[in-house]
Amino acid sequence: MKKFLFLFTTLSLIFSTDAQAFGVKHDFTVFLGPFNASHTEFTYRLSPTNYEVKSDVKTAGIFDTLYPFRAEYATTGRIKDNDLETTSYKYKSQSRFNRRSKELIYDQQGNPIYRLSSKNDKTKKVEILPDIKNRDTTDLQTVIAELARQYNKVKFCDARLQVFDGKRRFDVIFKDEGQEQLTANEYSPYQGLATKCSMYIDKLGAKGDDLLWELTSDRPIYFWILQDPKSQRPFIARVYIEQTPLGALNVYTKNITLEN
């Protein structure tokens, strides 16, 4: 569950801009199979020299009784020579039985060098990361930010970007799927002609037992981008995965708040 929630919050970075300073907050409702599974708040801020991303995730309703989960994700970075460089990535979560945290430490060139992790408040484990030396290989939230900038410039999703999550290297592949008409419903007031994009992971031969890792290798995740009629800023309106062990995953944007 936590991997699905993290994924769609990072997709929300499509709502970025080339303006001097800008921010947006998304409020999401997530359905997983028959469950109204999660309420999530996502905030993104961009300036000419820096960016900041924060996600607060919590399960809801019956799903919260069955699979309680809370998590916070935070990424900060700088914009240098027209590139986005991660400067910090932090994550902490609490499920029914476990509390976990993870932090990636980066050098001055934006390369991840250390991974700090802990479980149930035990002493943090420190791991020296592989010598990647590749500023194009970074955390997933920054990769989505790169795609966001591309979309704002050319209104097109096609891209192949590199990620290192502290354990594995993989590529994230985005494809433009044309346009579709979205209609408002009881979960989201947003409607109109939307750009449809897909995303999946190329594991580059790596192995793992992560559920999201396996699902996104076999089938795409779809998302739809609309534009706010007043500001003309693009934002994610819907996210959809056709099949998970609990059924289809549907994410609806309940509300957006613009920050100038």
Image (spheres, grey):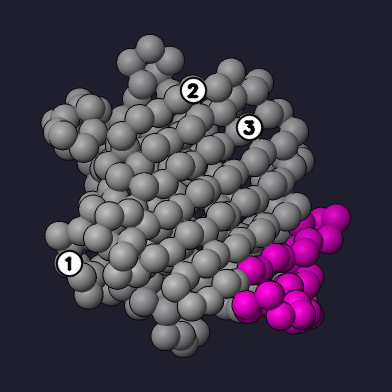
- Residue range in magenta is 101-130
Would you place residue 97 above or below residue 223 in this image?
A: below
The image position of residue 57, as x and y in percent, is 45, 53
- Badge 1 marks a residue whose secondary structure is loop
Which residue of the protein is positioned furthest toward the front in this rendering?
Answer: 65
Give the Cα separation between the discs numbered 2 and 1. 33 Å
Q: Which residue is mark 1?
A: 247
Give the Cα separation between the discs numbered 1 and 3. 35 Å
Q: Which residue is mark 3?
A: 46
Residue drawn at the location 31% of the way across and 30% of the way down: 226
Would you place residue 28 above or below residue 199 in this image?
A: above
Quadrant assignment, res 67: bottom left
Which residue of the protein is positioned furthest toward the right in this rendering?
Answer: 108
Would you place residue 219 above or below residue 178 in this image?
A: below
* Image quadrant where one finds the C terminus: top right
Q: Is residue 173 visible?
A: no
Residue drawn at the location 53% of the way across and 38% of the way down: 43
- Badge 2 marks a residue whose secondary structure is strand
Find residue 258 and name its label.
Answer: 2
Q: Give the mark nearest the N terminus, 2 or 1.
A: 1
Dot 2 alpha-carbon crowd within 10 angstroms: few under 14, some 14 to 19, many 20 or more: some
Mark whose residue sits in front, 1 or 3: 1
Quadrant assignment, res 82: top right
Inspect the magenta stretch and tell me whether residue 236 lies in it: no
Quadrant assignment, res 27: top left
Amino acid type, residue under disc 2 in the picture: Leu
Q: Give the mark nearest the N terminus, 3 or 2.
A: 3
Give the Cα separation between the discs numbered 3 and 2. 12 Å
